[in-house]
Amino acid sequence: MRVEHELHHRRRGRNLGVGLLLVAFVGLIFGLTVVKTLSLGSIVELERFDHVARPQLVPQAKEAGQ
């Protein structure tokens, strides 16, 4: 028979608490990402939102002569 020490019981409880907090944090970040992505509307707005200059995504104004 192997008897578990009281220290192991407390450590398991702390590890469970930290694990639950980590899962809650990941869920919160995932939820915020989904809401932010869905609120942008079109994929062009999503691509433009990352603050990187990508001229191929910005519609070019047609010149008056064409």
Image (cartoon, grey):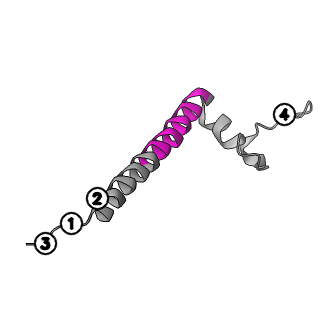
- Counting residues from the N terminus, which is met first, the one under dot 2 or under dot 4? 2
Residue 45: quarter of image: top right
Q: Is residue 61 above or below residue 15?
A: above
x and y percentages locating residue 12 in the rendered image? 32, 58
**Residues drawn in magenta:** 23-39
Residue placed under numbered mark 4 in the picture: 62
The reply to whether dot 1 and dot 4 touch (C-beta < 8 Å) is: no
The reply to whether dot 1 and dot 3 touch (C-beta < 8 Å) is: yes
| Residue beneath the point at 76% across and 50% down | 52
Helix, strand or loop status at disc 3: loop
Residue placed under numbered mark 3 in the picture: 2
Q: CA distance from mark 2 to mark 4?
A: 71 Å
| Residue beneath the point at 53% across and 42% down | 29
- Counting residues from the N terminus, which is met first, the one under dot 4 or under dot 3? 3
Amino acid found under the numbered disc labelled 3: Arg
Look at the image and say whether residue 9 sits in the magenta stretch.
no
| Residue lying farthest to the left in this orientation | 1
- Counting residues from the N terminus, which is met first, the one under dot 1 or under dot 4? 1
The reply to whether dot 3 and dot 2 touch (C-beta < 8 Å) is: no
The reply to whether dot 1 and dot 2 touch (C-beta < 8 Å) is: yes
| Residue beneath the point at 45% across and 46% down | 21
- Counting residues from the N terminus, which is met first, the one under dot 1 or under dot 2? 1
Residue placed under numbered mark 1 in the picture: 4
Helix, strand or loop status at disc 1: loop
Q: CA distance from mark 4 to mark 3?
A: 80 Å
